[in-house]
Amino acid sequence: MRLTRYFLPTLKETPAEAQIASHRLMLRAGMVRQAGAGIYSWLPLGFRVLKRIETIVHEEMQRAGAHAVLMPTMQLADLWRESGRYDAYGPEMLRIRDRHGRDMLYGPTNEEQITQIMRDDIQSYRDLPRNLYHIQWKFRDEIRPRFGVMRGREFLMKDAYSFDLDFESARRSYNTMFVAYLRTYARMGLRAIPLQADSGPIGGDLSHEFVILAATGETRVHADRRLLDMDAACSGIDYDGDLEPVVRAWTSLYAASDDKHDPETAPVSGSDLLVARGIEVGHIFYFGTKYSEAMGASVAMPDGERRLLHGGSYGIGVSRLAGAIIEACHDDAGIIWPDSVAPFDAGIVNLKTGDPLCDSIAAAAEERLHAAGLEVLHDDRDERAGVKFSDMDLIGLPWQIIVGPRGAASSRVELKRRADGQRLDLSLDDAVPCILDSRT
RNA sequence: CGGGGCGUGGCGCAGUCUGGUAGCGCACCUGCUUUGGGAGCAGGGGGCCGCUGGUUCAAAUCCAGCCGCCCCGACCA
């Protein structure tokens, strides 16, 4: 992709409203623009990141046996009256009336909608267990949206819903999601810590929130330091096997949010205790028959008895992750994307556009990387070197291929790793495998 | 919602107290010079001063109402 044909409106100065690093950098890097309080447009660069996050989430959900669907953003109030949440949810729910005077709402979550689907289309115990998920925009009319996309009113969320015959089976579904979440965050270059959580307004009695460590996080985490040494990628996991030991290994280590942490009773202290800030990027719940009972979702058992479905719901804040990743991965110059979610795998900086040799090497580099299956952003603007360097550092692509008159004569380019600033002077032929190797 | 603050070219701001017809830096356009870490000079374009009403010969400036946005608090992916 040639930058002169792209839409990448970077800013040299920081807009006044941006307080935290991720918000500042997302605005400066031309990823998002604010449309209203807590409402954002995603520009090309930001949209790419969103899509790459989605891809990882999709892959891990499907690996864990969940199936992708797409439920609507607009829901009928009557459905929510069945569960009792139309009144219970409060002013955070955006209520709308259509031209016929029907009460509707912009979905803050989808338990009712998915329960209706299961109720209507699953009749036998043979059809269970099932786990359906979607990635869809949500709206929660927060009292005070802030921190850019980290706490917007409109946000993109992956929400999965499991349905099982009984608690034991539901617990397996819960464990499956638990592991899938660890893997998902690990693939994004994040270290997630599961905290025992209150189940909140969704209800239920088995719940964990996943928090990633970042200096600017909103919640303070107190955790057993050994959690940092755990294998978050859960390599070699077998979802058909017993996941209980894996989940227990994680949950047996102490981890508590600030409000739950009591230094008197905490089993770890001193240097064994990690005290850090974190950002909540996921939350999983088992809520039993809360919705199936209220809404009449049951299946026939072998003996003809009807049995209520046991449900769980599992959320990942996809748009929040875009911000959270930046909070965890940036420096003074800008963003440092993990390879797996970077909007482009590499950037090409042509330091002397208009020079036939530099132009041809830069063009060849773009072609070569593209042929290798890499996404690449080619800065072919007629700008000064400093402008290009700082923009490239700002948008944080993992690799930079710098083409300049110094190396051009001997057909060499400079390969710079954004994360550590390391530079290698090599031929184009040698640069491509370097970049390929860094991708997982 | 309670408390605080702000709204002036795309971005960052000054001007408001003390009314007199809008300015600075960056960005943008043209030209020349420059060219490995946010260039220099010259010229140029762009503003319903958030909106509505009021006071006044005259309002960005004073008054009233409204709208929007940000920050601190209680809530959340």
Image (spheres, rainbow, N blue to C red):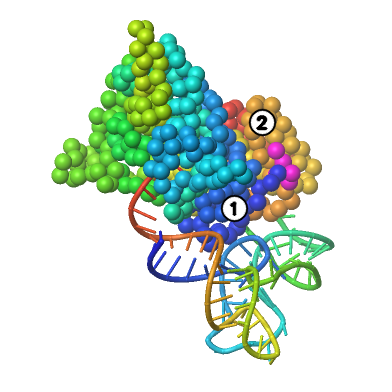
Q: Which residues are magenta?
A: A1-5
Residue A59 seen in the figure = no
Instruction: Please tell me how many numbered marks the rendered image carries.
Output: 2
Query: A7 left or right of A196?
Result: right
Residue displayed at 31% across by 21% down: A167
Residue B44: x and y in percent read 80, 70
| Disc on res. A105 | none
Residue displayed at 36% across by 40% down: A201
Query: A65 left or right of B31?
Result: left
The chain letter under disc 2 is: A
Same chain shared by disc 1 and disc 2: yes
Residue A282: x and y in percent read 41, 36
* Residue topped by disc 2: A369
- Residue most toward the front? A100
Residue displayed at 64% across by 53% down: A387
Residue A385: x and y in percent read 66, 52
Marked residue nearer the N-terminal end (1 or 2): 1
The chain letter under disc 1 is: A
| Disc on res. A35 | 1
In the foreground, B41 or A177? A177
